[in-house]
Image (spheres, coloured by chain):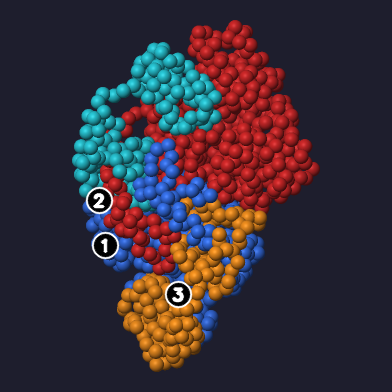
Chain colours: A red, B cyan, C blue, D orange
C-alpha cells in the first residue's frame, strides 16, 4: 500500500513543529503550520511552507480542537497530518478522524493509540504478554477507601489517561491519600478530561529507562536503543541520555525483549517508546507505552544517525524498514537537556516573559532544536520548552565535557531558564559517575545562592551597561560599505570602547 | 565609571568586579561577555535606571543600581511611608485560579497553600510567605489572573 | 615523553580560534586568545578564557608577528601554542621559536614544516618516495625564458612558498607567460615574502582530492578518509565533501598509499593533509602536503566522530593514537560550504561591511562553526570567512537535501555572501550527480539575474519595513513579566501586526 | 500600504508581491520571513528612506523605494544637472593600491585593468566599466583607499 505524502500538516507548535518542518523540507514535502492567535509570528510558522490559523490562544480552542485542525488540513490541501508530541498526538479519536477524512495519520493505528492510551488497559496487556509491570492496580481506584491491593505506602497515584507527569501524586501516608487523590483527579480532569486515577507501588530508588521503537506496516520492528530519563522534576523529564549508564548488556537485552512483547501485543507501526522503571537490583517494570515521537528522540538520532521523523513519514507512506535501520548500531554517547523557561531556584516553577538575548551553541558534536529566538514571547498558554540542547561524543565523559562547554556558550536573557541547574548538574559528582536516580533533584539540588563572584560580575555588567546604554542608543552606527540600519538603533560595539 | 552606583543583589550590597572587561556582542538584545583574570563568561543584561537583570551561568539575577541621589530619594520615600502595611501576596505568573484554600479571617502558617493557579498546563500552589491572618481574598476559583495580580492580603 | 598542556595560546582569529577554544574548554585547558586592534571585541576573544593584544590591524603587525605572539604567550603563562590554519601555521621559523621558548608547538616538527613548506622540495621528496607528482618543474622558474621542461600550455604557475591559491596563475599561451609570471611573483611576495615561482602542467579536467592524516610521536599514522575539494574559485576551495563521489575503493587505496609514503618521507606527527589532483582516468598526482589543520577538517570529524583538535593536543602532549582512532571507520556523508563575505555575482570578489541579521541553521545533522555574529564588522584586513556550514547524513543525496534545507534557514544581512551561489549549487544537476571538477564555477556558474519573484519579494519586504520601521522604533516594548529593554529600542513584533 | 512606493531593482520597476505576508523575527537586525501561496522564505532587510537592501536566498538586492513626492524631486534634480558628466571609477572595497595600470590621457577598452587593489590578502583588478579616455588618476601604488573612494575618472 502506497500513500504518497505531498503536503503534511503539522498539528503542533514550538520546537517540534520546527523540527518536523525541517525534515519535510529535506524530503521535498510541503509543510503546513497551524497556529493560534498567540503564535501568529512564531518561529514554527516562519519555518513551514504555509500556515493556517486554527483558533484562539487556549489550547482547547486551537491545538486541541480536532475540528479546527481538520478544517485547516482541508483548506491547505494537506494529505497527511503529523501530531508531534503532546496535544492530539495520543488522541485516538483524532487519529481516527484524520483517517476518516481520507488523510494519512503519521503514527500508529488509532486502535493501538486507544488501547495504550488507557494506562490501565496497557498495564493489563503488558502483564498478559509476560512483561513485568510496576506492582499496583489494573483498575481505577474508587476513592480513598478503595482497594489498594496491598500496595503499601509510599505509593504513586496516576491518571489512567495520563502522561507527561500530569495527574500524578506521590502519597507517603494513608492520611495524605484523600487530599492527594482529589488533587490528582482535578489535574487529570484539567489535562485529559477524565478523572480516573489508579495507584502503583512507589519504586525508589529507580531509574526511568525507555526503549525507542520504530516499526513498519509489515511487522518489522527496530529497537533503537534505550534512553535514561531519570533526571526529573514534577515527574517530568529534564535530561535524557543514551545509552543509560545503568544498563548492562544483560539488562538491555531484557528491556528490548519486554519492549518487543508490549509492541507485539498490539498492531503497531511508526515510532513509539516503551517506558520502564529500573529498580536498584536492575529489574525493570513496565510503566507505559507512548505511541508517538518523544521530546527526547533526538539523542537516539544522534547515536544512530537516523532521522526518526523521516522514517515515520516513510513508514506512513508504506515503505518498509530496510535492514540498515532494523540493525542500526548506536555510536558514542548523546545527552539532551531541555531548556525550559522555569526557575530552578523557585521549585522549577514555569515563568513567562519575553526572550531577549538568545545565543545557542555551535561547533562539533552539538545539536540545537529551538522553537523560539530573540524577541519571542513565552506565554503562559503553553508548555514553556524553549529549546533542546543535545551533545554527542565518543563516550559519556566526552559528552558531559561537551555539555558543560555548550552550557557555557548558551545565553538566554529576558526569562529565567533551567540552564543554571544544568550548569550545576554537569559538575555534580554523582551525575558525572552515572550514579543517579529519579530523586536526584529532590535529594541533591539545594538551589545554591549565587556566588560572591557571580554577584560581583552581575553588578559590573549592569553598571557598565547603565553607563553606556543611553549613549549607545543615541548614536547612529557609523555605517559600513553600504546599507544602514533601518531604525538607527543597532548601536555598535565600536562606539562603546 | 561604575563606582557611581551602589549595587544591591538579594538585599546585599555588592562590590562590582571592576577588573573585568565588558564586551558587547549584541547590544539590542543585551548579549555581552565579561573577561578577567579568572576566565571569561558570556552573559545577558536587560534593564534601565535602577532595575537591571543579569543572566550569568544560566541564572538571572536582579541587580538594583542606585546613584547617591537615587538612594537619598528612595530613603526619603520609605521614611514618608512609615512602617510596612499588610503583606500582599501576588501571582508570580498569569493563569487560571483553580482552587482557593485561604479563607478570610483564618490564620495560616508559613508555607501553607493559599491558592492554586494553573499555568503552563501545571497546577502551581501559591504558599504563604510567612505566618499571618488572611485579611482579604481577592480571587475566586475560575478567575484568570495576570502576573503580579494581588491574590490576597496577609496581616 | 609527556608535556602537559594547561594553558594554550591560540595564534589565530575568527572561526578557527573559536573552534580551538571550544575543544580547550572541553578538555579543561585554559585558552588564550590573541587579537589585533581590529579584533578587540571579536567573538574569538569573547570565547577564550583570557586574551592578549598583539598589535595593529595589518596581519604583519599582529597575527604574523612572531615576536608579538611569543610575548603574548609569555605574558599569559601559556605552555603551548596552536597556530590554527593560515598566518603562522606553516611557518617553520615560528614553530622552532615556540619550541625554543620552551613551549609546545601543536603541529608537526619544525623541520618537517620547513621541508614541506618549500613546495619544490616537497615535490622532489614525493617523487623520491615513488609518489606520482603533477608533471612540471622541481626547481624555480628563472623567468619567461626559463626551462619549461616540455610542460606545454596551458600550464599553472605556483609560488614555491605557496598555499591557499595565492601566487597562482593559469597561463594559456606563451604570450601570457611574462605578465602572469610578474603577477604571480608580486602576489607571492605579498603573501609569503618569497618571489620564487614554478610551473606545472595544467591537469584538466581534474578533481582536487586530499587525504587527512593524523599521527603520533611514536610513528602511528591514521588515514582518516579523503575529502573532495573540487568546487573552487581563484584556486581556493569553497565546498568540501567526504567521501569523494569520484573515489572508488581502488582509488582510495592508492591515495592512502601515496599519502602514507609522503608522510613516511619526513618525521611526522599531529594533523596534516596530502593534496592530490585526480585526473579523468582516476590517476592521482601529488600536489602538496599541508602540515596543519585544514579549514575543512570538520567534515572528517562529522563522519569519523573524532575531534581532530583534541587529538592534535593529545599527540602534542605525548599521547599515542589508540586503535579506535587509527582504525576509525567513516559513517555516512558530510559536506561543508564556506560562508564568505564575497559576491558570486561579481566574480566572487571579497566584500567588507557590517553583518546585521545573522541566523544560522539548527536541527538534525548540522554543524556551524562561526567566527562572527550579528553586528560584527567584516574588515578588509583579513580573510572574509564568516562561518562554515556543515551537514552530515546517511548518504550523499541526504546530505545535499540537508544542505539545501540548511541554506534555506541561513540568513546573513548587511554583507553579500556566497550563500546564493551554494543555493544554486545544490540544485545544479552535475553537482547532484557527483559529476563536477575544478572548473565547475568557470564552466557552469552564470551568475543568473534575480528572478521576477525574488525581486517582487524584495520590493514587498522593503516597502513593508519602510512603513512599519519608524513606527516600531518610536514605541517602547510593552514589557513582559519583568525586565525592560535597556535602551527602549527592541521594538516588538506584537506592536507591528 | 506598500502601494505608496515605486520599487526599482537593477534599474527595473518592480511590482511588490503584496499577497505575501511579512513576519518580523528580529527587528533590530532586520530578520523577517515572507509567507505566501508559493511557500515561505527567510530574509534580511536593511535600509532607510529610499535605499534598501534585501537578502533573499543568499542574494543581496538593492531596492530603491520612492514615493510619488520623492520621484518628482529626483526627476527635478536630474533635469537641473543636465547630462551625466565623466564616469567616476570607485574602489568597491577598502585596501592597498599595489599597481596602477591606467595612465592619464590614454584610451582604454571596456574590461581593461585600471588599478590593482590588495584586500583580504587577494589582489583584485579594477577594470574599466566601459571604453573611454582616462581623464585623471587619483591614486598611486602604495596608497590605502577607503571603500567608495574615487580611483580615477573616465571621459
Q: Which mark is residue C345?
A: none
- Who is closer to the viewer here, C481 or A208? C481
- Rounded to the nearest angstrom, the CA distance separating label 2 from label 3 is 38 Å
Residue C240 visible somewhere in the drawing? no
Task: First in sequence, mark 2 or 3: give its number.
Answer: 2
Residue B89 x %, y % = 39, 24
**Discs 3 and 1 carry the same chain letter:** yes
The residue that mark 3 highlights is C168
Task: First in sequence, mark 1 or 2: give its number.
Answer: 1
**Discs 2 and 3 carry the same chain letter:** yes
Q: Is the residue marked by circle 3 packed among few (<14), some (14-19), or many (20+) residues within 10 Å?
A: many
Q: Is residue A207 left or right of residue A149?
A: left
Up the image or down, C486 lies above or below A66; here it is below
Residue at left offset 70%, top offset 30%: A92
Residue A96 lies in what quarter of the image?
top right
Residue at left offset 59%, top offset 41%: A36
Subunit ID for the residue under disc 3: C
The residue that mark 1 highlights is C55
- Rounded to the nearest angstrom, the CA distance separating label 1 from label 2 is 16 Å
The residue that mark 2 highlights is C76
Up the image or down, A428 lies above or below C9; here it is above
Amino acid at each position: 500500500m502506497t500513500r504518497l505524502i505531498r503536503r503534511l500538516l503539522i498539528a503542533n507548535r514550538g520546537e517540534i513543529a520546527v523540527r518536523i518542518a525541517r525534515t519535510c523540507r529535506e524530503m521535498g514535502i510541503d509543510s503546513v503550520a497551524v497556529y493560534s492567535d498567540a503564535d501568529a509570528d512564531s518561529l514554527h510558522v516562519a519555518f513551514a511552507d504555509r500556515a493556517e490559523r486554527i483558533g484562539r490562544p487556549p489550547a482547547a480552542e486551537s491545538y486541541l480542537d480536532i475540528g479546527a485542525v481538520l478544517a485547516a488540513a482541508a483548506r491547505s490541501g494537506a494529505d497527511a497530518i503529523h501530531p508531534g508530541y503532546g496535544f492530539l498526538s495520543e488522541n485516538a479519536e483524532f487519529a481516527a478522524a484524520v483517517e476518516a477524512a481520507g488523510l494519512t495519520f503519521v503514527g500508529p493505528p488509532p486502535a493501538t493509540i486507544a488501547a495504550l492510551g488507557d494506562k490501565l488497559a496497557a498495564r493489563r496487556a503488558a502483564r498478559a504478554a509476560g512483561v513485568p509491570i510496576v506492582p499496583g492496580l489494573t483498575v481505577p481506584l474508587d476513592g480513598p477507601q478503595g482497594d489498594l491491593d496491598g500496595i503499601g505506602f509510599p505509593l504513586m497515584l496516576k491518571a489512567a489517561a495520563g502522561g507527561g507527569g500530569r495527574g500524578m501524586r506521590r502519597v507517603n501516608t494513608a492520611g495524605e491519600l484523600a487530599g492527594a487523590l482529589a488533587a490528582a483527579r482535578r489535574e487529570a480532569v484539567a489535562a485529559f478530561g477524565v478523572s480516573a486515577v489508579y495507584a502503583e507501588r512507589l519504586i525508589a530508588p529507580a531509574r526511568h529507562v525507555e526503549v525507542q521503537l520504530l516499526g513498519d506496516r509489515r511487522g518489522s520492528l527496530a529497537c533503537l536503543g534505550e534512553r535514561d530519563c531519570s533526571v526529573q522534576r514534577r515527574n517530568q523529564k529534564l535530561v535524557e541520555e543514551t545509552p543509560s549508564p545503568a544498563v548492562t548488556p544483560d539488562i538491555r537485552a531484557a528491556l528490548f525483549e519486554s519492549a518487543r512483547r508490549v509492541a507485539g501485543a498490539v498492531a503497531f507501526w511508526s515510532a513509539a517508546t516503551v517506558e520502564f522503571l529500573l529498580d536498584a537490583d536492575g529489574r525493570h517494570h513496565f510503566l507505559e507505552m507512548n505511541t508517538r515521537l518523544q521530546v527526547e528522540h533526538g539523542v537516539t538520532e544522534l547515536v544512530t544517525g537516523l532521522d526518526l521523523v523521516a522514517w515515520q513519514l516513510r513508514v506512513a507512506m508504506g515503505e518498509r524498514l530496510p535492514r540498515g535501520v532494523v540493525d542500526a548500531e548506536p555510536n558514542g554517547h548523546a545527552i539532551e537537556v531541555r531548556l525550559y523557561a522555569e526557575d530552578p531556584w523557585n521549585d522549577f516553577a514555569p515563568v513567562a516573559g519575553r526572550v531577549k538575548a538568545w545565543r545557542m551553541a555551535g561547533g562539533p558534536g552539538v545539536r540545537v532544536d529551538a522553537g523560539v529566538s530573540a524577541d519571542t514571547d513565552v506565554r503562559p498558554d503553553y508548555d514553556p520548552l524553549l529549546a533542546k540542547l543535545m551533545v554527542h561524543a565518543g563516550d559519556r565523559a566526552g559528552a558531559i565535557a561537551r555539555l558543560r562547554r555548550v552550557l557555557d556558550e548558551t545565553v538566554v536573557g529576558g526569562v529565567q531558564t533551567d540552564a543554571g541547574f544544568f550548569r550545576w548538574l554537569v559538575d555534580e559528582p554523582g551525575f558525572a559517575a552515572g550514579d543517579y536516580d529519579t530523586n536526584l533533584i529532590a535529594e541533591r539540588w539545594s538551589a545554591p545562592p549565587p556566588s560572591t563572584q557571580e554577584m560581583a560580575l552581575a553588578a559590573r555588567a549592569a553598571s557598565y551597561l547603565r553607563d553606556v546604554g543611553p549613549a549607545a542608543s543615541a548614536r547612529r552606527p557609523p555605517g559600513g560599505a553600504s546599507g544602514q540600519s533601518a531604525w538607527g538603533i543597532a548601536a555598535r560595539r565600536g562606539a562603546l570602547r | 565609571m561604575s563606582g557611581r552606583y551602589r549595587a544591591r543583589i538579594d538585599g546585599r550590597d555588592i562590590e562590582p568586579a571592576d577588573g573585568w572587561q565588558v564586551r558587547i556582542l549584541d547590544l539590542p538584545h543585551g548579549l555581552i561577555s565579561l573577561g578577567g583574570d579568572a576566565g571569561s563568561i558570556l552573559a545577558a543584561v536587560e534593564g534601565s535606571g535602577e532595575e537591571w537583570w543579569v543572566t550569568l551561568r544560566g541564572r538571572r539575577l536582579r541587580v538594583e543600581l542606585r546613584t547617591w541621589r537615587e538612594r537619598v530619594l528612595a530613603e526619603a520615600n520609605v521614611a514618608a511611608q512609615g512602617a510596612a502595611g499588610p503583606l500582599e501576596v501576588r501571582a508570580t505568573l498569569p493563569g487560571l485560579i483553580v482552587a482557593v484554600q485561604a479563607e478570610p479571617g483564618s490564620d495560616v502558617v508559613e508555607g501553607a497553600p493559599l491558592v492554586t493557579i494553573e499555568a503552563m498546563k501545571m497546577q502551581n500552589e501559591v504558599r504563604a510567605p510567612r505566618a499571618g491572618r488572611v485579611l482579604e481574598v481577592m480571587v475566586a476559583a475560575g478567575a484568570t489572573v495576570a502576573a503580579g495580580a494581588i491574590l490576597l492580603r496577609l496581616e
